[in-house]
């Protein structure tokens, strides 16, 4: 089992506490088979609410899949306790937002989509519907009377 951390980096404007919202949040990933190196073209997602038993009674994982090329069964599990918000203090630096425990898989790409939430940095105004698919998001904080945004979203994976 290998643990991989998804590191998130963005430029924040008047927002903080950027985080995935809810247990049904979908982490869209491209996963490479550790046996044959195959990387499927399609995005796959994992969530905390989905739990699949592993063969041989070895526990469970967020997703179990069979490689289409070599037929090896691989799995990935979201480590619930590692999910961390990206805050104003983290602005423009890489920070590990979540860790995945992988058996036979390696995450190679991440596509942020809908399901993120944020708060006004000074006011705490909730922004519950943040979509980062375009790598940028903007809104307006009525309490602070200023624009808010998340820009230049990027990521990388590290071994933990």
Image (cartoon, rainbow, N blue to C red):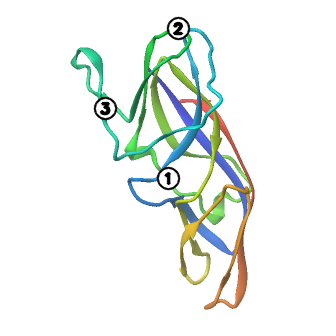
Q: Residues within 10 Å of mark 1 (few under 14, many from 20)?
A: some
Q: Are marks 2 and 3 in contact (CB under 8 Å)?
A: no
x and y, in percent, of residue 136 in the image: 74, 61
As displayed, is residue 67 above or below residue 99?
Answer: above
Mark 1–mark 2 distance (CA, rounded to whole Å): 35 Å
Say whether disc 2 or disc 3 marks the residue closer to the N-terminus: 3
Residue pointed to by mark 2: 70
N-term mark: 1 or 2: 2
**Mark nearer the N terminus (1 vs 3):** 3
Left or right of 47, for residue 97? right
Q: In this view of the protein, can residue 13 be seen by the observer?
A: no
Residue picked out by circle 1: 84
The residue pinned by badge 3 equals 52
Say which residue appears at 40% left-offset and 39% top-offset: 79
- Mark 2 residue element: loop
Label 1 or label 2, whichever lies nearer to me, is 2
């Amino acid at each position: 089992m290998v643990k991989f951390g998804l590191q998130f980096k963005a430029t924040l404007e008047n927002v903080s506490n950027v985080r995935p919202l809810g247990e049904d949040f979908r982490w869209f990933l491209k996963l490479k088979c550790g046996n044959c190196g195959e990387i499927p073209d399609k995005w796959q997602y994992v969530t905390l609410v989905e739990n699949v038993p592993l063969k041989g009674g070895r526990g469970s994982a967020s997703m179990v899949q069979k490689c289409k090329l070599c037929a090896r069964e691989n799995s990935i599990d979201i480590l619930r306790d590692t999910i961390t918000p990206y805050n104003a203090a983290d602005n423009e630096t890489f920070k590990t937002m979540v860790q995945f425990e992988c058996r036979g898989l390696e995450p190679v790409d991440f596509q942020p989509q809908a399901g993120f939430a944020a708060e006004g940095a000074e006011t705490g105004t909730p922004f519950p519907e943040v979509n980062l698919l375009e790598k940028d998001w903007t809104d307006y904080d009525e309490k602070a009377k200023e624009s808010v945004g998340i820009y230049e979203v990027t990521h990388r994976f590290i071994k933990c």
